[in-house]
Amino acid sequence: MVRGPGITHPAAPIPRSGFVLGPKGALYPEYPVAAVCARVLGRPVKWISDRYEDFMSTNMERDQFWDMEIAVNGDAKILGVRGRLVHEQGAYLPSGIVLPWIAATTVPGPYVVPAFRMDVIAAMTNKPACSPVRGAGRPQGIFVMERLMDRVAHELGLDPAEVRRRNFIRPEQMPYKVGIIFRDGRPVVYDSGDYPTCQENALAAADYTGFRARQAAARAGGKYLGIGISNVVEGTGLGPYEGATVRVARTGKVTVFTGATPQGQSHKTTFAQIAADQLAVGMDDVTIVTGDTGTIAWGMGTFAARSAVNAGSSVYLAAVEVGKKIKNFASGMMEVAPEDLELRDGHVGVRGVPGMQKSFREVAIHAISAPGMSNLGGLVPGLEYTAYFTPDQSTYSNGTHIAEVEVDIETGAVEIRRYVVFHDCGRVINPQVVEGQVVGGVAHGVGNALFERMVYDDNGQPQSTTFADYLLTTAPHMPRVEVHHMETPSPLNPIGVKGAGEAGTNPAIAAIVNAVNDALTPFGVWITEAPITPQRIVELLGEAALGRTR
């Protein structure tokens, strides 16, 4: 065995190749180096990074420092929001400055903010570089605004839900121009949504009106409950494009090729649903092939809750065109007008005449034609079509999260007793898939809210270098998440969908911290940070007891 810094290769010869695994969303120098070494040596090369090295060098996110002000009138209506964001960028710019940009433009959320100003600073440090992780700056912006809303409620003696209710953008104001530019280079224009109804539904599902009685009863027994609300508007479906080819083979089966590359988001299920719906076949008759440049040349990948919007729309558009081709070819075969035909259960037939039909297999063979024959009407051979969907702007999903927690004031431990989500991602393709995305995102958000803190010494050296130091959400900490769906279809794409991949994470931190703060109200604690670990809760209680609250 020959060894070098972080690289090994065995003596036994195997085919020329290099294979590396690592975190999503970044190209680390070791990856191409390992591949080049494999080519030069003619042997496989394996690059190994242990957990300590991973914590020392893997790109991070979330560290930001905000100094914010909000102005409201006597009715708690927002007059303006301004502030300063210092974004911890680390030593390099692997993703440019999109993270502070997204964070700053997320702040207004679902509220009418007549005046808005943010000074944004990306601070270069000697820490690991910063690149997007699930949420990509949005959780921080949401945290800031939702804490401000709670602060307004506290100062004016109003219910937090009422303060939000008074400031919501109304459905009749859609499309709503926020007045700022998003990271896609387009103005932030909310395309659709009913934010007041979303919150009202979530409050009802969480029995918000009955909470104060539960809270009082718990305090009488020495327990401290809190409830927190968090509203989100999330830019999704980022461009520039995604494509799909839909093909009906001579077997009559359907294959969809797309450049979208899934990492567990059930793309094959949802894309098959879209194609099957438009071609009137069973999902088992549809095969999805993803991320193969041998079948479709261009694809941008999976990020920013964009695949359902872009790839899903391109599958829809391609399937619609293939359906038209099936009717056009069958029209000549059956001597009827295309508009008199319909697709049904893998066949194309005359409307109202069940027995008069041709199978997709028959039409596909006919569409290829035979040597020396001509296709009447100049039809392009084959039942195949490629479509690319290019969005004009991002589409904006929204939701309300409500967390009910119990805080142990002796240990600082937080138990999430109940967690309710009302989420609107436009037309829902598959409710189970969306629910899985939301629940997984909430699990991430629970960790961000209560456990995941990277600690550095004064020289910028990581002190959290194992999972004993950097804690993650585990089964005992994870609540049962009650997910409810709303549907306000987007007018920006043909299937009316909005993204859902990051919806669970984005509002979770604010909802949980708001709930913890509510539980600690009797002690005069005011939380301005996340994560809020058990140790930090005990520290804040101690500071409050000594009159050192901020």
Image (cartoon, rainbow, N blue to C red):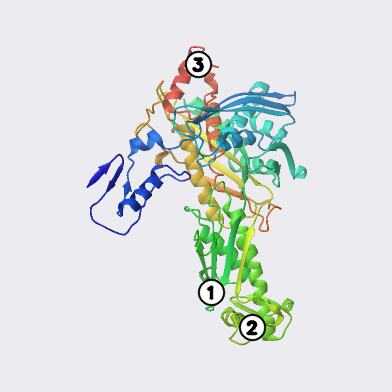
Q: Which residue in the protein does label 2 denote?
A: 357
Mark yes or no: residue 210 visible. no
Between marks 1 and 3, how big is the CA–CA gap? 68 Å
* Secondary structure under the numbered disc 3 in the rendered image: helix
Please give the residue where the numbered disc 3 appears in the rendered image.
Answer: 544
Label located before the other in sequence (1 or 2): 1
Question: Residue at (50%, 55%) from the top-left corner?
Answer: 261
Residue 374, image quadrant: bottom right
32 sits left or right of 498 in the view: left
Above/below status of 11 relative to 461? below
Please tell me which residue lies in front, 134 or 446. 134
Q: Residues within 10 Å of mark 2 (few under 14, many from 20)?
A: some
**Percent coordinates x, y for residue 422 in the rendering:** 60, 45
Task: Find numbered disc 2 in the image and state the secondary structure of the residue it sits on.
Answer: strand
Task: Between residue 351 and residue 364, name the one nearer to us.
Answer: 364
Q: Amino acid at mark 1?
A: Lys
Farthest residue to the top: give it: 546
Task: State which mark lies toward you, 3 or 2.
Answer: 2
- Checking the image for residue 253, the label placed there is 1
Q: How far across and how far down the image is residue 342, in percent?
A: 68, 76
Q: Kindly identify the amino acid type of the residue bearing the numbered disc 3.
A: Ala
Confirm whether residue 197 shows in the render.
Answer: yes
